[in-house]
Image: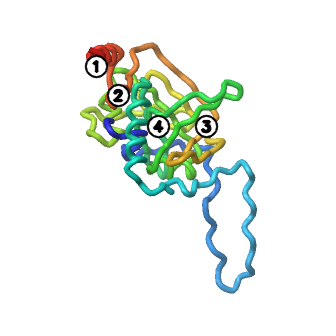
Amino acid sequence: MAEREGVARLTRVAKVAPPTDSTGMMPPIRQAPPAPGSPSRQPPTPPRSAIEAPTGVAKLTPRSAAAEAAARELRQVMGRFATGVTVVTTTHRDTIHGMTANAFLSVSLRPPLVLVSLGRCRMSEMLPRTGRYGVSVLASDQEHFAAHFAGQKVSPVDPSFVWEKDLPLLDGALAHVGCRVVDVHTAGDHVLWIGEVEYLSHREAEPLLFYTGRFGTLREVSDRAAQQSR
């Protein structure tokens, strides 16, 4: 994950047969044009709550030396904020899609809201179509899955999933959160996908952490920090 801010490489992992009563799918993004000769009709106005595909996500300002230096400094500073590691999943057309992300946080307790911040990636293209996502918080013995879903190295163990509320969640994770997308905000070169929590579960174990561009356990992160401070 070093030098991969946002950890947003997408891996297509498996074709499955999802439950047939899936709910929460989003309205079509586009409608087919009317047939020649048929009376033209204005498409119905979608409700305000409908989630549309974000536009302008990748409108980056021209890169200058000063801007690049500032971005590197921000990456180094924010890398000192140790976080957990998650795998975000969704399913579309009988295929599970997943990606590693550490930009995940709780937004509200009442109502229960969380968000995941995604850069320019396939997952940001998938969510307007599926309207739902799952978050699996990784345990310390799941580092191989973190690298796998970040597109760094194929895991020696095939990922397996459990299904809750029609969402695939990585088996063996510390915690599971199932969400329905309720709001989307473009923020610079990322998009904030706010989800209302529909499912929760957790277990006790040691978490996997991400610190200064690397994965590690609590002890490994502590030892590295001590070495860097000498």
Please provide percent x and percent y for residue 123.
Answer: 47, 47
Please provide percent x and percent y for residue 46.
Answer: 72, 57
* First in sequence: mark 3 vs mark 2: 3
Q: Which of marks 2 and 4 is in front?
A: 2
34 up-or-down from 197: above or below: below
Q: Name the residue under label 4.
A: 88
* First in sequence: mark 1 vs mark 4: 4
Q: Name the residue under label 1.
A: 228
Contact between marks 2 and 1 (CB within 8 A): the answer is yes
Q: In which quarter of the image is the C terminus?
A: top left
Distance in Å between CA atoms under marks 1 and 4: 31 Å
Q: Nearer the viewer, mark 3 or mark 2?
A: 2
**SS state under label 2:** loop
| Residue at the (62%, 70%) spot, across then down | 32
**Type of the residue with mark 3:** Gly
**SS state under label 1:** helix
**Type of the residue with mark 1:** Gln
Q: Name the residue under label 2.
A: 212
**Type of the residue with mark 2:** Thr
Distance in Å between CA atoms under marks 2 and 1: 11 Å
Q: Nearer the viewer, mark 1 or mark 4?
A: 1
